[in-house]
C-alpha cells in the first residue's frame, strides 16, 4: 500500500480508484515475491494479500522458506472497516489463524497474543515491540501551557468518546489546556476544542513534541487485550506522560505513578488529568522516567537481537 492508497483507504468513497490502486499493489507484491522466491525466511507482519486464502504464503513455504509471523494486535478478531463494507466482508480473521498454524514461528508483541497463538496451534514466543527514541525531537518541559493529545487512526478515535464527559469537564475547568488529535480523521467532540491534524511522519513528530500528556482509553473487550501498547510506548518514547486504561498489556508497560498513570474507571480520568495539569513537576518526573524506561527496555538493538536469534535458529536448523 503506497501513500496514495493509504490516504484513500481511510477516507470515504472513491471505490473505483481504490480498486485500481489495490490491483496495482497486489501486482507489486507478487512481483516482489517472485524476485525473492529463493529466500530462506519470509518475515510477515500481515498477510501477503489482504483478501483471499494464504496461497502466496503456502507457495513460498513449498519453495523452502521458513515463515515467521510477527503480530502485535488481535488480528484474529474481526473489526469492521469504518469506510469500506466490502473490505470488511472479504477480510477473514480465520486467515490469521491459518497463518499462525502455517508459520514456523510466531513472534507476539505480548504474552496474551503468544498464548492465543499457541491455542490456535502455532509455535510462539514473545518479543515486546521496539521503539526508536532517536526519531523524536528533544523534549522541552514548561509549565505555562499544557497540551493533552491523542495519536492514532480514524478507526480508533471513537474510543475517546468513552471518556467524553470527563474530558469535557477538564476542558471547561482548565482553559489553559490545548487539545491536539493526530490521525483521527473527522473526529469531533462537543465541549472539547480538539485541534485535528492529519497523520504523517513529520506531523507525528511535531505533535508529540508539543504533547505533555497522551491519552489511551480502551474499551472493556477482548480486542483490547491484544493491544501491545504501541500508542502508550510512543508517548513514553517522546517524553510524554501516558495516561492509559488499566487493562491488558498496559499493566505491564506502565508503572503507575512512576512512568505514567493507569486508569481503572471513568471518574478517575478527570481526577488524574486534573492532577497532571496542575503539577508540572509531576509531569516532568513521570515523562523523564517513561523515556528512560523505553530506552532501557525497548531499544531497537536489544529487540532486534532477539528476533535475529530466533530467525537464525530456524535457518540453522534447516541447514543442519
Image (cartoon, rainbow, N blue to C red):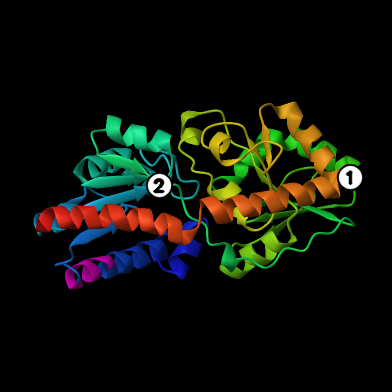
- On the rendered structure, is 84 left or right of 115? right
Dominant secondary structure (helix, strand or loop) of the stretch shown in magenta: helix
For numbered disc 1, what is the local secondary structure?
loop
Q: Is residue 310 above or below residue 110?
A: below
- On the rendered structure, is 79 left or right of 181? left
Question: Where's residue 211, x and y in %?
Answer: 73, 56
Residue at mark 2: 127
The boundaries of the magenta stretch are 29-35
The quarter of the picture where the C terminus appears is bottom left
Question: Where's residue 304, x and y in %?
Answer: 39, 58
- On the rendered structure, is 274 left or right of 123? right
Magenta stretch: residue 30 in it? yes
Q: CA distance from mark 1 to mark 2?
A: 40 Å
The reply to whether residue 153 is visible in this rendering is: no
Q: Residue at (34%, 46%) from the top-left corner? A: 107
Q: Is residue 190 above or below residue 38?
A: above
Question: Where's residue 141, x and y in %?
Answer: 80, 59
Q: Residue at (60%, 50%) from the top-left corner? A: 293
Amino acid at each position: 500500500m503506497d501513500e496514495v492508497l493509504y490516504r484513500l483507504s481511510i477516507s470515504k468513497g472513491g471505490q473505483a480508484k481504490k480498486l485500481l490502486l489495490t490491483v496495482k499493489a497486489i501486482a507489486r507484491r507478487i512481483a516482489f515475491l517472485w524476485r525473492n522466491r529463493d529466500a530462506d525466511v519470509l518475515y510477515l507482519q500481515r498477510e501477503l494479500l489482504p483478501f483471499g486464502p494464504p496461497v502466496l504464503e503456502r507457495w513460498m513455504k513449498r519453495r523452502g522458506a521458513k515463515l515467521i509471523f510477527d503480530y502485535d494486535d488481535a488480528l484474529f478478531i474481526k473489526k469492521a472497516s469504518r469506510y469500506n463494507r466490502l473490505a470488511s466482508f472479504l477480510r477473514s480473521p480465520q486467515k490469521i489463524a491459518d497463518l499462525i498454524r502455517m508459520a514456523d514461528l510466531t513472534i507476539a508483541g505480548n504474552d496474551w497474543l503468544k498464548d492465543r497463538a499457541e491455542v490456535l496451534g502455532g509455535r510462539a514466543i514473545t518479543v515486546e515491540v521496539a521503539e526508536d527514541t532517536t526519531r523524536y525531537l528533544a523534549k522541552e518541559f514548561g509549565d505555562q501551557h499544557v497540551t493533552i493529545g491523542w495519536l492514532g487512526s480514524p478507526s480508533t478515535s471513537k474510543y475517546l468518546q468513552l471518556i467524553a464527559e470527563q474530558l469535557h469537564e477538564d476542558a471547561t475547568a482548565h482553559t489553559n489546556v490545548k487539545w491536539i488529535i493526530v490521525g483521527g480523521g473527522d473526529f469531533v467532540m462537543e465541549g472539547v476544542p480538539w485541534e485535528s491534524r492529519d497523520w504523517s511522519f513529520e506531523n507525528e513528530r511535531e505533535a508529540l513534541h508539543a504533547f505533555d500528556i497522551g491519552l489511551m482509553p480502551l474499551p472493556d473487550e477482548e480486542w483490547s487485550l491484544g493491544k501491545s501498547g504501541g500508542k502508550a510506548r510512543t508517548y513514553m518514547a517522546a517524553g510524554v506522560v501516558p495516561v492509559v486504561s488499566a487493562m491488558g498489556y498496559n499493566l505491564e508497560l506502565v508503572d503507575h505513578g512512576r512512568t505514567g498513570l493507569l486508569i481503572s474507571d471513568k471518574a478517575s480520568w478527570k481526577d488524574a488529568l486534573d492532577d497532571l495539569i496542575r503539577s508540572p513537576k509531576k509531569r516532568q518526573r513521570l515523562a523523564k522516567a517513561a523515556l528512560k524506561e523505553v530506552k532501557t527496555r525497548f531499544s531497537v538493538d536489544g529487540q532486534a537481537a532477539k528476533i535475529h536469534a530466533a530467525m537464525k535458529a530456524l535457518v540453522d536448523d534447516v541447514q543442519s
